[in-house]
Amino acid sequence: MVRGLTQRLGDAGPLSGEGPGALPNSFPTPLAIASADGQALSAVRLGYRAPYIRELAERVAGGTLNLEELCTAQESTEEIRRALLDIKGVGPYAAATLLMLLGRYDHLAIDSVYRAFVSRRYFEGRAPSDEEAQQVYADWGSWKYLGYWFDLLQGLDEEV
């Protein structure tokens, strides 16, 4: 999807094109996405995400949503989480991942990869409930997502 968006809607820089040293187009601006017609978005193959991405782009381009404020916000993690969840198409998994990218590790993104990892590592292959899976990193407090990543990376290192 990212490749499709950059190829179809991103700006070509001086080194864009084919061959060695060529760089991909830049990621499109919110205005470019908001202005794209339905055919262009369909060609990117965004699937069910297309209306959410368009709405997000329209809000950012129109100035009704300032994503930069989330990066520098002094609000609590819970307030930022609520702001993220107010973006149509952002659910608990995406909100936890975005919070992690903002340097806030309070929430875990519970998905099939997380469940499989904690099942193997902490539950001898038994599928834990989401509550049990959450408790694995509870002692990490506001650093739990970071604790999971360290644990995951250590596990990958052991497998390699």
Image: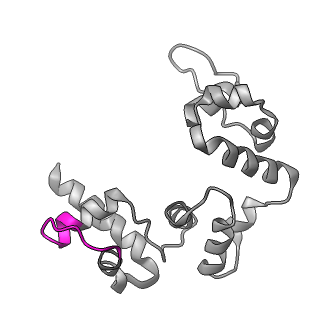
Left or right of residue 86: residue 107: left
Residue 25, visible in the rendered structure = no
Q: How many marks?
A: 0
What residue lies at 22% left-to-right and 67% top-to-bottom?
Answer: 127
Q: Can you see residue 86?
A: yes
Q: Residue at x 25, y 62 (%)?
A: 117
Q: Nearer the viewer, residue 17 or 31?
A: 31
Position of 124 relative to 116 (above/below): below
Tell me which corner region of the image, top left, top right, bottom left or bottom right, holds residue 40: top right
132 in relation to 90, above or below: below
Q: What is the x, y in percent for residue 149?
A: 35, 64
Q: Which residues are magenta?
A: 119-130
Residue 44 pos. (x, y %): 61, 29
Q: Is residue 159 magenta?
A: no
Q: Residue furthest left?
A: 124
Residue 68 picture location, percent across and down? 73, 61
- The quarter in which the N terminus is drawn is top right
Q: Horizontal and vertical percent for residue 52?
A: 67, 49
Residue 123 lies within the magenta run:
yes
Q: Residue furthest top?
A: 19
At a point 80% along the width and 48% down the height, the residue shown is 58
